[in-house]
Amino acid sequence: MVYTTPWNRKIEFGRTMVMGIINVTPDSFFADSRKQSVLEAVETAKKMIEEGADIIDVGGMSTRPGSDPVDEEEELNRVIPVIRAIRSITDVPISVDTYRWRVALKALEAGADIVNDISGYQFEPDIVRVVSENNVPYVLMHIKGTPKTMQENPHYEDVVKEIKEYFTEKIEYLKEKGVNQIVLDPGIGFGKRYEDNLEILRRIDEFKELKLPILIGASRKSFIGITLGNVPPEERLEGTLAVTAYCTMKGVDIIRVHDVLPNKRVIRMMEAILWQRL
């Protein structure tokens, strides 16, 4: 399967890809991911690309649990110069991490290739129109609530079944609106309990029944910290790498991570063991 953008940049599925995270924010949960200037963001992007990143994901608003949204103009001022600058140095696909349709549109005009929407178009439905009119890939994520409220006692009877039902309904709507290049993100940590996050990973194969690429964003998240003895984000790399190894074994298409090189090496080693692939 190959997804393309109007600029003829291709995203070829068939092996596990790495999406490197660049947060143009002062408050994302992992401090090392925060980039405060265009120069710093571009240097980070260069390093990630050298280390093997397949996609660069740029976001201008923290969506950590309990966070408040920033003003739209502030989000634009953070992400657009960074996307434009990164595009000037590479043809690697760029994803914009936003749920706002105006930010998505301006990001695509600046050279982004993918819209990564944590809200599943719930917060600003016009984002679907932007994606459709520009014929770009769309990451459809599951979330319960908003970043501000999502961890206030979320509950599921069967988390995987409920997420699949959510995806099925939204995929049908997206296709009716002309959006066909869809990536599914179950939303690890977005309105999920500790046990829900583990259950999603344990049953990741069930999402393949929807016959669309799967993205997992588990890097340094709190369920890893809990599992490892309530360690802070700075001490969650090994747990993240374990999740990456598992996802590679399960054929997950994209892993969204803060640390490109170690994750890329884990994927390479797993692929060599599983499929003798160099």
Image (cartoon, rainbow, N blue to C red):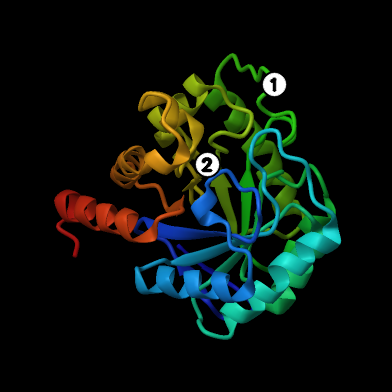
Q: Which of pointers 2 and 1 lies earlier in the amino acid sequence? A: 1
Residue positioned 30% across, 55% down in the render: 262
Amino acid on which disc 1 is placed? Glu
Question: Considering the image in quadrants, where does the C terminus appear?
Answer: bottom left
Q: Is residue 34 left or right of residue 2?
A: right
Q: Which residue is mark 1?
A: 152
**Residue 10, percent across and down?**
50, 73
**Residue 186, percent across and down?**
55, 38
Q: Could one spot residue 132 in this view of the protein?
A: no
- Measured Cα–Cα span from mark 2 to mark 1: 29 Å
Q: Quadrant of residue 39?
A: bottom right
Residue 206 to residue 262: above or below: above
Residue positioned 57% across, 57% down in the render: 34
Q: Secondary structure at mark 1?
A: loop
Front in this rendered view, residue 6 or 63: 63
Total labels drawn: 2
**Residue 111, percent across and down?**
65, 77
Amino acid on which disc 2 is placed? Leu
Q: Could one spot residue 75 in this view of the protein?
A: yes
Residue positioned 59% across, 14% down in the render: 157
The residue sitting at the bottom extreme is 88
Q: Which residue is mark 2?
A: 210
Question: Considering the image in quadrants, where does the N terminus appear?
Answer: bottom left
**Residue 250, percent across and down?**
33, 41
Front in this rendered view, residue 169 or 185: 185
